[in-house]
């Protein structure tokens, strides 16, 4: 594809539909996207359901189809449930760009993956085992049993553990339903019921905060370590207090920018299923089978976390 | 309390099955004991402290719900009210450094105002409580959303965190638990020994008769909904202090409205109104917290937690129900 | 029996009319007016809302599952009860049906039939808990909804089935072709036909069938029904079973619409369905209300929501407005119901001196 | 003596319906003024206005000459005016003492305003003692019988220092014996100089207790009579607006030989024991007794709505013990319950719906749906036969007066073609005119060969209707009266002797 600034002559309408509005990570995507949209002659709309429900996202898609948007970008609550509605959109000539959490491949034109799953799994393991040791007993605190991306990451964690740290034992898997309070309760329960646990891998924004809060409340800072996938604002205090030594994520603001850039290219019809392109200020990306990997995991720790505000 | 209770107006001496407090204490202790046998870690002071702490927020909401149900009403809007207050207090603290006393004032004022709105809709406009609060459920949830504008609370000032977790003056009992004891005592006194509380029960027994006996039924109804709103918003503040976080789905996402009703009814309050048990409510909430923690200690697969909660509700409500034909 | 009492030559001549024969009254008419206003209003003001009859009818696919739940739920609410488990029932039966199909290779339609039957059974369990254990419907169905919800999560596993055969997905997104005249091809969603069929069936059932009569009687006065020789238990069992079956039908339609199942897919149904029933004029205390009202209210709330979304309002504002409309319409209905001399007088009288509250029907 | 309470030109409308059209009435201290009138004449409405529960649409009230505006019931209490309501104001979950004090609980001194339970109980006890009522103040109010609820209401009025006391149909749920107790209380209050007024449909009571009778018809006061000129026939005619005469006891029995209902050794294990009787076609059998004697329980057990612990019920020779009421109705046994509003009728449903609800099977169907035309036919002929006064078949029962509601309930059951009917308090709360009509219907049904079991707490009613009377005391049949032995005095004596400490079964 072309590199540099794409053709922005025609003003287009692009919507960004997160899993739910009201979470800081998605807000960070929005911030980046908004700024980028202004540069690319895009009418930008951020809309979505209030609770993380597929029904709410489908309602949003349907209204966007009726309003003849050019591109829909979305991170899905569920890969399969959203497919019919998105396919309707594609049939109506709308380009669909998934980011963060994928939908069924047939129901989108491109997918921007945050980071490659194995890389992220490795980062999660390393940021705990480095401190808890290769013989640690660890627990997993996730969002819900059927959360796609979390399950992918957990799978990658298990694969990496088996290969690299075979002595590490996963003694419990709990779910916090993406609710900070339920994650906290689950975290407390894990630590109380399994006093020998020294690491919690919590690959979910609410879960890692809950796990960190639980460790702090039980006074186990420095004895139990946790990590997860969270925006820096949410975990800043725990990174500073040492409950969290390292936590991997990626730059959500920049990811939002890339989403808009890809949306523009897709609308222009300037992106092929296998392709490369360079986005000014973001870098060069490879499209492989419609999938674009956004970045390597970005590891936050006490030394760098204050550079990121989202 | 027992001396006072002996002189309370309790009609006839109830059998132990009808003393819901005793039943709840017994089953809670029994479940804790059994789990303790399987996994001694359950019975450590630290763990029990958290079992108690985890029940505080729900208990406070449920106390308000108890008063409303005692009056033959129902308040579904407690969940979004709790979330709204958590969000407003949390965001103001997080980004504007609102001092704790200010947050208390804001939470209480918010609860009073919106609770009064519920009360006016129910009492003056005569809209059935379940419909009123179903409507305000959407409204208050929307306010939370509009206010937060897509952001969340993930950090509160140290004063808040200290209030939510530590004990005052270095006591081992956390402040929220003490606050709950105070609020419970106040509700208990109000319901059993104040004119206001007795009037609430009279309205719950028979509103027309209460009116004819000279009670200001409309005003009482409004006051009780205001109180329920107040407690819900206060619990939202406790929540944000304890967890240090809040999102737009706080309260509604955990179905606090249904949990608070369940806990009140399990505690011995009649859904048809007229009889209420505030101590039972708090004990039921403690029981719920115990059960949910116990499931983890017993290594029950997480997907069955909610089934455990449902069973517990049915069993506990069943244990000592005097058949009342009424419905919501 | 024949009575040999010679009544005084028609001291009180009675005109044999029966105003309840038509199941519509003022409220249903008001709602219909509102529906017309909503459709015409959005049609005029929101581009994209009306782009031909197919688009308008197609919009109903987005909300008719709520309507199916509301129809079943209205039977339960007419008895004076409530069913909070409809969401969980919808999820559980859809998940189980999908698993039957994907894991055990059962024909999808047979699996769907099993799903609906299962919904009926779950409703029976609700009724059993209410009647046998003597627990109030509110708390009983709250408890069972937790149980069913857990079961749905367990049954769904980490990767719930999706990608149903084409014939099945037509249930949620297809249109009726072939049966109808060719001019209507591609116009009428199958969902709409299903909903209309159930709407007519339930309307006749409640308004004119012996079961409906008994149902309403139980709703107004369970005691009087019992003293009239009505086996009230059976009536309640039927109502809850039907509610369960309708909920699972809605779950299956959702499964077809999404071409996938999820263990929490039914959760969104409950509050909206209750709102639809109540706005439709069914009294939460039982007895009063018509299915026709519920049907119109389903369309009003559905089109209103779709219209607002298309007009660019956010999900949140739309939800808030729905709540406000519910409150305002019931308030207005109450004001007019007081057989007063005028709205203003009523409001004034209310401010000056509240009416004594209704007697306690306990 | 103060306490002159006067109403001047009181008017009241509900929407377009004018209930009171300018009523003026003087209530004087030391006098009992009775209001009589047909169902729906506006009696209760007048009382509610006098007690501040409902605002009048026009007219004025004055107390001892000074104008009085009552904004609420509590304002009325403050002025010493108390209404004992038609349905007692029960607060089921609260104690007797607390129901008496509701709205005016005594509190202790102190910042908390704690309710003073000790004082409350003592004062409640004293008020009950003053009326010689042996009711425990700690009982939950839901355990009180209707008679006891009335009595508690009287004590409640005194407790609040009210000296103007209005009683709305206090006696309709009471037996003669309990009425006597209430009247002794009323006499004491009158001697004490209280201003009293009451509503009743029972002529004998009215003539016994009143100093003055005011007759209300269609919202207007048509007659006020002083004690010396009381005249049954005149009062009756004034009430209904046409000449009426009280019909004496019927002399011929319609009883045939064939036994329709036979009950043997029936017990429910709690409230009644070893009850046996047989009832022939065309016979009217009465059940007399005190309230709480267990007559309703006996009837409900025979009807199958309550389980029996022992015994046998035979209907026309067929054993039907243990069948539920659904089956009983289909076998030809029906029961008209005593509590019309709760058990007999569904007030928000229409006349037609109520009439056909007794046996929906008889309504013709088309495609499984009830034929509206057939339903209307059934209900129209029932309304005609039972002389229900209504504006149309689609009126809800709530819009009818008590007497007409009762006629609809009668129609509901009698049109199912029963062989045996149990009538429990068939004329409770029914005005004199409608009462006569109901009596005539019962006579006609007996003539038709129906077997009837009538439960009533009014001795006169049983005497008027029955061929034979069984007297029930504490769940056992203690006496049987028949033929010339049936007189009001004999009926009352039959169960009162059983109640007397000497015990024994009266003949
Ligand atoms: N709140 C109300 N709204 C409308 N109509 C009413 C209301 N209360 C009473 N009415 C009507 O006013 C009329 C008089 O009622 P009221 O209760 O005063 O009669 P009553 O003389 O006490 O009769 P009864 O002997 O049956 O007790 C009746 O026709 C009744 O239907
Ligand atoms: N011992 C008692 N304990 C509780 N309630 C009682 C008792 N005795 C009577 N009652 C109440 O009084 C009412 C009348 O009692 P019951 O129906 O047994 O009497 P009955 O013989 O049918 O008299 P009647 O037909 O004159 O009312 C019942 O509703 C019952 O609840
Ligand atoms: Mg009256
Ligand atoms: Mg009786």
Image: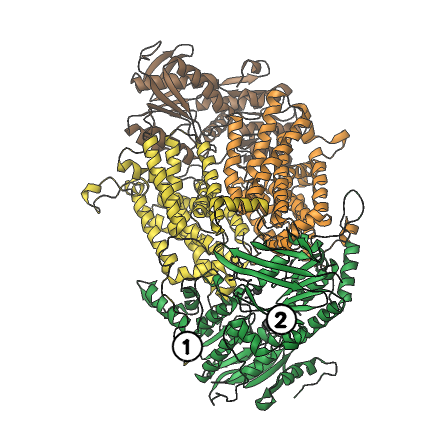
Chain colours: A brown, B orange, C yellow, D green
Q: What subunit carries mark 1? A: C
The x, y position of residue D390, in whole percent, is 44, 66
As drawn, B151 above or below B302? above
As drawn, C7 above or below D193? below
Secondary structure of the residue carrying numbered label 2: strand
On the question of residue C251 being in view, the answer is no
- Of all residues, the one furthest to the right in this rendering is D109
Q: Nearer the viewer, mark 1 or mark 2?
A: 2
- Residue, disc 1: C7
Q: What label does residue C348 carry, if any?
A: none
Question: How far apart are the alpha carbons under marks 1 and 2?
Answer: 32 Å
- Residue, disc 2: D213
Secondary structure of the residue carrying numbered label 1: loop
Snapshot quadrant of residue D479: bottom right
Judge: label 1 CB < 8 Å from ligand 1. no
Q: Is residue B322 left or right of residue C247?
A: right
Q: Residues within 10 Å of mark 2 (few under 14, many from 20)?
A: many
Q: What subunit carries mark 2? A: D
């Amino acid at each position: 594809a072309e590199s540099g600034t794409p053709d922005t002559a025609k003003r287009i309408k692009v919507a960004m539909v997160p899993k739910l509005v009201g979470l800081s990570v998605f807000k960070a995507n929005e911030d980046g996207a908004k700024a980028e949209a202004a540069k690319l002659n895009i009418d930008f709309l951020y809309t979505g359901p209030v609770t993380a429900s597929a029904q709410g996202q489908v309602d949003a898609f349907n209204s966007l189809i009726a309003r003849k948007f050019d591109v829909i970008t979305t991170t899905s609550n569920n890969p399969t449930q959203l497919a019919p509605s998105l396919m309707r959109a594609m049939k109506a000539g709308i380009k669909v760009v998934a980011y963060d959490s994928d939908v069924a491949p047939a129901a989108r034109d491109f997918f921007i993956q945050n980071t490659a799953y194995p890389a992220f799994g490795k980062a999660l393991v390393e940021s705990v085992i480095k401190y808890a040791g290769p013989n640690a007993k660890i627990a997993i605190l996730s969002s819900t049993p059927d959360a796609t991306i979390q399950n992918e990451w957990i799978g990658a964690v298990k694969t990496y553990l088996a290969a690299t740290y075979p002595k590490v034992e996963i003694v419990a898997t709990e779910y916090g339903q993406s609710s900070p309070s339920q994650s906290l309760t689950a975290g407390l329960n894990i630590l109380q019921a399994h006093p020998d646990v020294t690491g919690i891998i919590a690959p979910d924004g609410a879960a890692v905060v809950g796990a960190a809060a639980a460790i702090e409340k039980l006074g186990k800072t420095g004895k139990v370590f946790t990590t997860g996938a969270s925006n820096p604002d949410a975990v800043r205090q725990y990174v500073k207090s040492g409950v969290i030594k390292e936590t991997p994520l990626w730059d959500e603001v920049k990811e939002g920018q890339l989403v808009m850039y890809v949306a523009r290219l897709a609308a222009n019809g300037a992106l092929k299923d296998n392709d490369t392109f360079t986005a000014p200020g973001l870098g060069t990306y490879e499209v492989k089978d419609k999938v674009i990997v956004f970045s390597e995991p970005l590891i936050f720790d006490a030394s760098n976390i204050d550079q990121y505000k989202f | 309390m027992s001396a006072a209770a002996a002189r309370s107006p309790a009609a006839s001496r109830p059998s132990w099955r009808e003393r819901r407090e005793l039943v709840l204490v017994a089953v809670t202790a029994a479940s804790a004991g059994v789990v303790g046998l399987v996994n001694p870690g359950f019975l450590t002071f630290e763990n029990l402290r958290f079992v108690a702490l985890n029940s505080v927020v729900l208990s406070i909401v449920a106390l308000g719900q108890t008063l409303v149900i005692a009056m033959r009403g129902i308040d579904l809007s407690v969940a979004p009210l709790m979330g709204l207050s958590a969000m407003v207090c949390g965001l103001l603290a997080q980004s504007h450094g609102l001092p704790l006393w200010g947050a208390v004032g804001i939470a209480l004022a918010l609860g009073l105002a919106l609770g009064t709105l519920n009360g006016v809709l129910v009492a003056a406009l005569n809209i059935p409580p379940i419909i009123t609060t179903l409507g305000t459920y959407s409204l208050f949830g929307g306010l939370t959303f509009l206010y937060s504008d897509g952001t969340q609370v993930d950090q509160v000032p140290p004063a808040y965190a200290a209030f939510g977790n530590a004990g005052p003056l270095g006591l081992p009992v956390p402040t929220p638990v003490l606050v709950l004891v105070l609020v419970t005592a106040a509700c208990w006194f109000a319901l059993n020994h104040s004119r206001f509380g007795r009037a609430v029960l009279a309205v719950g027994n028979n509103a027309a008769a209460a009116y004819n006996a000279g009670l200001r039924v409309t005003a009482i109804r409004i006051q009780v909904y205001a109180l329920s709103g107040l407690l819900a918003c206060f619990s939202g503040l406790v929540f944000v202090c304890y967890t240090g976080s809040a999102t737009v789905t706080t309260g509604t996402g955990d179905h606090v409205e249904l949990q608070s009703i369940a806990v009140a009814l399990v505690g011995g309050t009649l859904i048809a109104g007229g009889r209420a048990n505030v101590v039972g409510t708090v004990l039921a909430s403690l029981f719920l917290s115990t059960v949910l923690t116990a499931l983890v200690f017993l290594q029950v697969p997480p997907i069955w937690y909610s089934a455990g909660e449902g069973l517990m509700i049915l069993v506990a409500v069943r244990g000592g129900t005097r058949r009342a034909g009424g419905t919501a | 029996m024949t009575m040999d009492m010679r009544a005084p030559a028609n001291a009180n001549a009675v005109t044999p009319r029966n105003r309840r024969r038509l199941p519509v009254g003022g409220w249903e008419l008001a709602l219909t007016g509102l529906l017309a206003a909503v459709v015409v209003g959005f049609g005029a003001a929101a581009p994209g809302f009306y782009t031909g009859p197919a688009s308008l009818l197609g919009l109903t696919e987005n909300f008719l599952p709520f309507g199916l739940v509301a129809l079943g739920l209205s039977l339960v609410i007419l008895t004076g009860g409530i069913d909070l488990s409809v969401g969980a029932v919808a999820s559980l039966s859809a998940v189980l049906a999908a698993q039957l199909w994907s894991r055990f290779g059962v024909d999808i339609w047979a699996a769907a039939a099993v799903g609906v039957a299962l919904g009926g059974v779950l409703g029976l369990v609700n009724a059993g808990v209410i009647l046998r254990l003597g627990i109030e419907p509110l708390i009983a169905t709250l408890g069972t909804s937790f149980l069913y919800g857990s079961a749905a999560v367990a049954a769904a596993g980490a990767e719930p089935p999706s990608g149903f055969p084409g014939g099945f997905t037509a249930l949620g997104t297809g249109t009726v072709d072939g049966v109808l005249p060719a001019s209507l091809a591609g116009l009428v969603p199958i969902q709409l036909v299903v909903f209309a069929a159930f709407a007519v069936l339930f309307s006749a059932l409640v308004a004119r069938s012996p079961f409906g009569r008994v149902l309403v009687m139980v709703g107004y006065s369970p005691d009087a029904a019992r003293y009239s020789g009505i086996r009230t238990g059976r009536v309640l069992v039927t109502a809850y079973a039907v509610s369960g079956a309708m909920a699972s039908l809605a779950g299956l339609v959702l499964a077809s619409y999404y071409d996938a199942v999820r263990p929490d897919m039914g959760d969104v149904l409950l509050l909206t369905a209750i709102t639809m029933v109540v706005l439709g004029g069914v009294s939460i205390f039982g007895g009063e209300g018509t299915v026709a009202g519920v049907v119109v209210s389903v369309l009003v709330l559905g089109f209103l929501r779709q219209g607002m979304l298309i007009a660019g309002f956010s999900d949140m504002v739309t939800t808030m407005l729905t709540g406000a409309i519910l409150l305002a319409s019931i308030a207005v209905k109450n004001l007019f119901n007081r057989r007063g001399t005028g709205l203003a007088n009523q409001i004034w009288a209310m401010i000056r001196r509240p009416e004594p509250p209704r007697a306690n029907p306990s | 003596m103060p306490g002159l309470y006067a109403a001047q030109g009181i008017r009241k409308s509900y929407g377009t319906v004018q209930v009171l059209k300018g009523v003026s009435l003087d209530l004087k201290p030391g006098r009992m003024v009775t209001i009589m009138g047909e169902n729906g004449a506006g009696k209760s409405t007048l009382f509610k206005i006098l007690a501040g529960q409902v605002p009048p649409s026009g007219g004025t009230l004055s107390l001892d000459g000074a104008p009085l505006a009552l904004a609420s019931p509590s304002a009325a209490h403050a002025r010493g005016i108390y209404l004992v309501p038609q349905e007692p104001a029960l607060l089921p979950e609260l104690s007797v003492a607390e129901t008496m004090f509701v709205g005016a609980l005594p509190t202790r001194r102190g910042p908390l305003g704690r309710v003073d339970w000790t004082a409350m109980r003592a004062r409640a006890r004293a008020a009950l003692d003053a009326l010689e009522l042996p009711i425990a103040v700690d009982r939950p109010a839901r355990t009180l019988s209707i008679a006891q609820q009335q009595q508690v209401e009287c004590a409640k009025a005194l407790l609040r220092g009210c000296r103007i006391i209005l009683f709305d149909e206090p006696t309709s749920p009471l037996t003669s014996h309990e009425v006597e107790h209430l009247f002794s209380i009323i006499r004491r209050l009158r001697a004490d100089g209280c201003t009293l007024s009451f509503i009743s449909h029972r002529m004998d009571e009215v003539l016994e207790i009143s100093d003055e009778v005011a007759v209300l018809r269609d919202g207007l006061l048509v007659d006020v009579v002083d004690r010396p000129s009381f005249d049954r026939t005149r009062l009756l005619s004034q009430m209904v607006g046409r000449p009426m005469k009280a019909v004496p006891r019927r002399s011929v029995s319609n009883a045939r030989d064939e036994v329709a209902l036979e009950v043997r050794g029936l017990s429910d294990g709690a409230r009644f024991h070893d009850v046996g009787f047989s009832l022939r076609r065309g016979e009217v059998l009465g059940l007399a007794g005190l309230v709480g004697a267990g007559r309703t329980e006996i009837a409900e057990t025979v009807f199958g709505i309550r389980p029996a612990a022992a015994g046998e019920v035979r209907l026309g020779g067929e054993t039907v013990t243990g069948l539920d009421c659904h089956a009983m109705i289909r076998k030809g046994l029906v029961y008209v319950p005593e509590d019309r509003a709760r058990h007999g009728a569904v007030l928000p449903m229409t006349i037609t719906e109520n009439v056909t609800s007794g046996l929906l099977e008889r309504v013709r169907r088309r495609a499984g749906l009830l034929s509206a035309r057939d339903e209307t036919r059934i209900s129209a002929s029932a309304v005609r036969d039972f002389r229900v006064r209504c504006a149309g078949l689609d009126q809800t029962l709530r819009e009818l007066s008590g007497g007409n509601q009762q006629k609809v309930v009668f129609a509901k059951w009698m049109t199912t073609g029963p062989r045996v009917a149990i009538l429990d308090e068939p004329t409770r709360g029914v005005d004199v005119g409608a009462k006569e009509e109901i009596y005539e219907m019962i006579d006609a049904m007996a003539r038709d060969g129906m077997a009837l079991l009538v439960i009533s707490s009014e001795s006169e009613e049983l005497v008027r209707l029955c061929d034979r009377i069984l007297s029930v005391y504490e769940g056992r049949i203690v006496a049987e009266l028949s033929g010339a032995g049936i007189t009001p005095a004999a009926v009352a004596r039959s169960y009162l002797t059983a109640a007397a400490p000497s015990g024994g079964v009266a003949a």
